[in-house]
Image: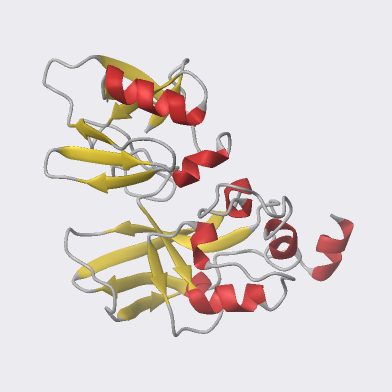
Amino acid sequence: MVVDAAARFLTQRERHTMALIEAHNTATGITLTTPGMERIIIPFPAPDAETLNVVVWRDTVGAVAAGIAADAWISAVLGLSCRLVYLADTTSRKIDPAFAPAGQPVNFADGFPVLLGSLTSLADLNTRLAVPIPIGRFRPNIVVRGAAPWAEDCWRRIRIGNVFFRVVKPCDRCIVTTIDPETGQRPDKTEPLRTLGTFRRDRRGGVMFGQNLIPENAGRIAAGDCVEVLEHGPPNVMLMSVSEAEID
């Protein structure tokens, strides 16, 4: 994770060009690349590396510094003083207990470990947009196809491969969806949020696309796996009525 000089997390919300940084796993750490810069190979921190507390939303989490070279590279790319940090203790940050059993961990993600997006729901959105967008705008970990548009609102438990997932919360979308991940630019500062807001705004004011998942077990999933819906429920998106949306 990248943090600023105050050790608070940085995302594409503040620095859109973060979209152009690619991270690749290696056996000993990660490699970062971005256009116009030499790649950097960053090893896992040594046992005696600097430790620091960092802030992700309302959570303060213990982290380990990735090192001076990593900090310099990230700072040069983003044009401000910042640092790269590593989560050594993957159990230290917890999912909101309102949506998960107490003590269930999440890493440096916004709030949940997995985000699911549906291509048929995207297709429905794209019929309403002047310029269609790809699913990458929503940054899902898992992309599914074949269900009816917005069917995922009623899923409660699914299986992919040999992994079971609980579907715990719809995803409230932010300005990151307006950033093209291929260019780091915002071709339209209002879309897709403006259009989503006309038919996917919930009664608390959030604009919803995708579902947050929590895995129940460790396992392997792969592209092409079938998605089996094991439990259904009422829609977990409480949408505004047309009259409510018009008042808003």
Q: Quick one: 201 or 101, which is closer to the camera?
A: 201
Image quarter for residue 59?
top left
Q: Nearer the viewer, residue 55 or 246?
A: 55
Coloring scheme of the render?
secondary structure
Between 48 and 30, which is closer to the camera in this rendering?
30
Q: Which of the image's four quarters has the N terminus? A: top left
Residue 235 sits above or below residue 74 on the image: below
Picture mark count: 0
In this view, the residue in front, 216 or 34, is: 34
Residue 12 is at least partly visible in this image: no
Q: Residue at x 33, y 72 (%)?
A: 158
As displayed, is residue 210 above or below residue 24?
below
Work out whether residue 75 can be spotted.
yes
Quarter of image, res 126? bottom right
- Is 161 left or right of 154, judged from the image as shown? left
Vertical comparison of 65 with 23: above or below: above
84 horizontally vs 211: left or right: left
Q: Residue at x 73, y 64 (%)?
A: 195
Give x and y (percent) for residue 105: 29, 42
Where residue 127 sits: x, y (%)?
68, 79
Q: Quadrant of the C terminus?
A: bottom right
Image coordinates of residue 5 in percent, x first then y, are 46, 15
Instruction: Identify the residue at horizontal 37%, vertical 43% (top origin).
Output: 95
Residue 70 horizontal/vertical position (percent): 31, 25
User: Residue drawn 35% across and 70% down?
Assistant: 157
